């Protein structure tokens, strides 16, 4: 497992908890709006942080942090992800996992062992637009199976919205895809200097009115929908 970044403190990545973040290197998608090209693009890969250094930091934060979130990149690409999670759990930390849902077999193994407390999955859009937004071929059956598995524990599904990639009406299909979920987050796309695709630097998100329309659609399918 190559860890390319550590976030030492967060109160927003696992709502209600104070956590640190570990970011894995490597991703099987190329979403243009992603703000972590150093974790996604091989030519920009961040140098790995020594494992001993990571766990020395976590040891120093025992009693001060509630848990750890593991993000990326795409953590479930790595066969040794369960080992990383076990080590965090053995230190007494709760664990939240971020995933794009492309490796349901890994998710199933993790869930059977009870290794994670919360999973957040990115929903790229309706299935008909998945490969276009991910800029890679996507196994849609894997996405649907991951959604089914994730619904069995505390979870959140979320979509980052770039106008033009997605329209308000797309959330009819997104709502059906995650129907019965606990929580869904509609996320504004924010441009910046570090994106996987420079073409997205001039793109915008939904207007507040469009976000509200999408939220009302989602509320027909999920228990809670937030805009952030």
Image (spheres, rainbow, N blue to C red):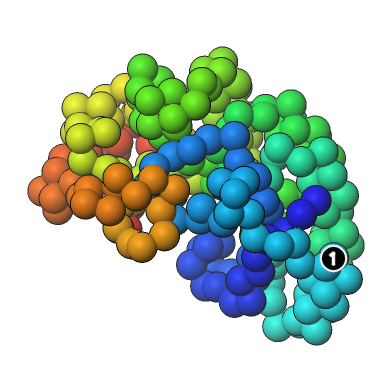
Left/right of residue 185 with respect to residue 11 in the rendered view: left
Give the residue drawn at x 56%, y 18%: 139
The quarter holding residue 147 reads top right
| Label 1 CA crowd tier, 10 Å (few <14, some 14–19, many 20+) | few
Give the residue drawn at x 51%, y 55%: 36
Give the farthest residue toward the front: 43
Residue 216 makes an appearance in the image = no
Expressed as whole percent of the image width and height from the top left, the position of residue 162 reads 27, 43
Give the residue drawn at x 62%, y 46%: 42
Give the farthest residue toward the left: 209
The quarter holding residue 159 reads top left
Residue 107 makes an appearance in the image = yes
Q: Report the residue marked by disc 1.
A: 51
Left/right of residue 210 with respect to residue 79 in the rendered view: left
Residue 185 in the image: above or below residue 140: below
Expressed as whole percent of the image width and height from the top left, the position of residue 11 reads 52, 72
């Amino acid at each position: 497992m190559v860890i390319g970044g550590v976030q030492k403190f967060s109160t927003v990545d696992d709502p209600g908890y104070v956590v640190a973040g570990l970011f894995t290197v490597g991703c099987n998608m190329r979403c243009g709006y992603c703000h972590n090209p150093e974790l996604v693009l091989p030519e920009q890969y961040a140098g790995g942080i020594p494992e001993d250094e990571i766990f020395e930091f976590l040891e120093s934060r025992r009693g001060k942090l509630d848990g750890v979130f593991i993000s990326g990149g795409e953590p479930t690409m790595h066969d040794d992800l369960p080992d990383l999670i076990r080590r965090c759990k053995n230190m007494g930390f709760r664990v939240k996992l971020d995933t794009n849902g492309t490796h349901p077999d890994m998710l199933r193994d993790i869930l059977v062992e009870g290794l994670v407390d919360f999973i957040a999955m990115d929903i790229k859009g309706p299935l008909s637009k998945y490969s276009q937004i991910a800029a890679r071929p996507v196994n849609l059956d894997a996405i649907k199976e991951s959604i089914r598995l994730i619904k069995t524990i505390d979870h959140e599904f979320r979509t980052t919205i770039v106008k033009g990639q997605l329209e308000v009406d797309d959330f009819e299909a997104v709502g059906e895809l995650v129907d019965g979920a606990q929580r869904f987050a509609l996320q504004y796309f924010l441009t910046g200097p570090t994106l996987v695709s420079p073409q997205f630097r001039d793109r915008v998100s939904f207007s507040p009115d469009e976000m509200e329309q999408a939220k009302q659609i989602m509320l027909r399918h999920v228990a809670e929908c937030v805009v952030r």
